[in-house]
Amino acid sequence: MLSFAAATRQLATARRCYATEAPAKKSSNLPLVLMGAGVAGLGGYYYLNSTGTSVSTQTQSPLDPENFKDFKLKKIVPYNHNTSKFIFELPNNEASLLPVASCLIVKSSDPEALKDAKGKPIIRPYTPISPPDLKGELTLLIKRYDSGNASKHIHSLKEGDTLSVKGPIPKFPYKMNEFEEVALIGGGSGITPLYQIVTHALSNASNRTKFTLLFSNVTEADILLKSELEALKAKYPSKFDVVYVLDKPPAEWNGPSGFISKDVLQKFVAPPTLKEKVKVFVCGPPGQVISLAGKKAGMQQGELGGILKELGYTEDQVYKF
């Protein structure tokens, strides 16, 4: 099993690091339910079909939490001006079986192609947007940053090339219906772990949790997964709502603008008086996370701060990816 210490070492140099230490306990993965101990091997999964019957499926994930493995890039789907979906082929039409919530770490398949100033491989974390039970494919949604060596390398790949992948790296062990209200606060490409949680939960017929997503971006063109989010809102109107916040809104914009403020949080997020019934997940650029929830302490959560603390939320109610 990949220890959290090992995971921490692998991610220590990442600029955009969303994974944090979490207890090594089994997470609720319906429609996938983990049968067995821990993450090692990711074996013994089952799913519930439409009649609620437990049906056996593959016993081993093609991913490896201890070693990097190369996966072939099957397809590139441009999303907007600086972001694309990179769809990787999983062997033997297998599913990834990723626990929710967890991420992967990636590096170049060519050891000479992606190094830092000290000659060490550049490793970065990414959260897949494809469901863990999807057979044959694993999809990463990656924004290209001019200063991001890893994102530039991935955007330079062509169909048929490979990327070296290791994982899963456990994050928050989501349990179905653990909370009555969940607020998802994201900025830019920080949407991916929030999307992983909400799609996982809403796809389960037993879900009773209400999710509200506050999603901030610079312009309307920068909103990632908008069509997917709107589809979720239409399909689950009583369980999911999304509020877009833009730094530079168009003239006809009716939603909130600027930074996610105290007023916006009070208007859309369930109050801290709900105690253990409410959870707030935050994922975005470091400045946004600090403003909303305080600075993380390396790979640890760090002391709660920012606007959420001012509003009375406690450390147990907030999780920073």
Image (cartoon, grey):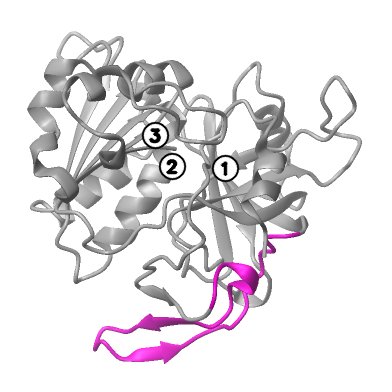
Tell which circle, 1 or 3, labels the residue nearer the N-terminal end.
Answer: 1
Labels 2, 3: front one: 2
Position of 94 with respect to 227 (left or right) is right
Residue range (magenta): 37-66
Q: Relative to 99, is 256 above or below?
A: above
Q: Residues within 10 Å of mark 1 (few under 14, many from 20)?
A: many
Q: Relative to 134, is 60 above or below?
A: below
Residue linked to disc 1: 126
Position of 104 with respect to 128 (left or right) is right
Q: The disc labelled 2 sits on which kind of residue?
A: Thr
Q: Which residue appears at 77% of the width and 49% of the height?
A: 161
Task: Name the secondary structure under disc 3.
Answer: loop
Q: Is residue 270 visible?
A: no
Q: Position of residue 141 (x, y in %)?
A: 51, 41
Task: Name the secondary structure under disc 1.
Answer: strand
**Does residue 49 show up magenta in the picture?**
yes
**Does residue 190 show up magenta in the picture?**
no
Circle 1/circle 3 CB separation < 8 Å: no
Q: The disc labelled 3 sits on which kind of residue?
A: Leu
Q: CA distance from mark 2 to mark 3?
A: 9 Å
Q: Residues within 10 Å of mark 3 (few under 14, many from 20)?
A: many
